[in-house]
Image: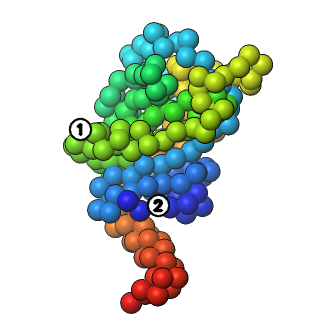
């Protein structure tokens, strides 16, 4: 898999049609069939006491509420509009791994569709926000490899979810707010008003060229170090 650092990922996401934001980095398969974006949120410990109250219909309705205003902002910045079609995968919480996951099916103004599959890897002091970008028809075939990739992620000792101690900073929202967005999650980070990662097909060739250029640069850099540069 190819890797992009945070700054290059921000540039790439802007090319995809996303509003500006900060990133930890990105991984993509060699054939660029799917990409995973990483962002860390130092928001405090998110309590999972809402794990049995994840009402998919209600949460989808809440996500759609900010759609009109979000598209106004996207249009103002010269980006295509986005419409939530529905759940690709309904929200679910894994008590063993403390992962919160769901998949949204999105449609851009030109009619092309993509899946944003999001995973919140909860930790003691915040969470890693992981977004899988892929075409809807590829999601099922990708999931096993994607889940294996997530299985290699771990917080360092002392920072895991189960090591929360009384007195640690608590997030001002719970699991439902992470899914639905809303004021508790901050205006810049919510719904379609915030950074929603979109795999625009019409920008595909431009984006591929950007990834290849960066990746080839990395290969040339290591080639000079090892003396294998062609």
Instruction: Tell me which corner region of the image, top left, top right, bottom left or bottom right, holds residue 194.
Output: top right
Q: How many marks?
A: 2
Instruction: Tell me which corner region of the image, top left, top right, bottom left or bottom right, holds residue 29.
Output: bottom left
- The quadrant of the picture occupied by the N terminus is bottom left
> Is 158 on the left-hand or right-hand side of 129?
right
The percent coordinates of residue 41 (x first, y second) are 63, 38
C-alpha gap between disc 2 and disc 1:
23 Å
- The quadrant of the picture occupied by the C terminus is bottom left
- Residue most toward the bottom? 230
Closer to us: 108 or 42:
42
For residue 206, above or below residue 217: above
Q: Which residue is mark 1?
A: 140
For residue 199, above or below residue 116: below
Residue beneath the point at 42% across and 67% down: 211
> Is 79 on the left-hand or right-hand side of 186?
left
The percent coordinates of residue 119 (x first, y second) are 45, 34
Task: Answer whether residue 41 is visible to the viewer in this image.
Answer: yes
Callout 1 secondary element: helix
> Is 212 on the left-hand or right-hand side of 65?
left
Callout 2 secondary element: strand
For residue 173, above or below residue 189: above
The percent coordinates of residue 80 (x first, y second) are 44, 50
Which of marks 1 and 2 precedes in the sequence?
A: 2
Callout 1 environment at 10 Å: few (<14), some (14 to 19), or many (20+)?
Answer: few
Task: Answer whether residue 83 is visible to the viewer in this image.
Answer: no
The percent coordinates of residue 159 (x first, y second) are 64, 33
Q: Which residue is mark 2?
A: 3
Residue beneath the point at 53% across and 58% down: 9
> Is 166 on the left-hand or right-hand side of 153?
right
């Amino acid at each position: 898999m190819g890797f992009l650092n945070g700054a290059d990922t921000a540039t790439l996401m802007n090319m995809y049609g996303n509003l500006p934001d900060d990133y930890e980095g990105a991984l993509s398969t060699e054939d660029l069939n799917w990409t995973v974006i990483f962002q860390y949120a130092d928001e405090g410990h998110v309590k999972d006491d809402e794990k049995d109250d994840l009402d998919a219909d209600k949460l989808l309705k809440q996500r759609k509420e900010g759609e009109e205003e979000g598209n106004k902002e996207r249009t103002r910045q010269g980006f295509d509009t986005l419409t939530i079609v529905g759940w690709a995968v309904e929200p679910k919480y894994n008590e063993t791994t403390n992962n919160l996951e769901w998949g949204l099916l999105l449609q851009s103004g030109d009619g092309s569709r993509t899946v944003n599959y999001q995973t919140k890897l909860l930790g003691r002091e915040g969470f890693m926000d992981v977004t899988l970008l892929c075409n809807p028809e590829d999601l099922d075939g990708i999931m096993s490899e994607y889940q294996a990739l997530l299985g290699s992620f771990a917080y360092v000792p002392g920072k895991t979810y189960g090591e929360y101690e009384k007195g640690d900073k608590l997030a001002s929202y719970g699991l439902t707010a992470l899914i639905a967005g809303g004021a508790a999650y901050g205006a810049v980070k919510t719904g379609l008003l915030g950074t929603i990662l979109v795999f625009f097909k019409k920008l595909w060739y431009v984006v591929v060229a950007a990834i290849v250029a960066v990746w080839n640069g990395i290969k040339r850099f290591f080639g000079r170090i090892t003396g294998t540069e062609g």
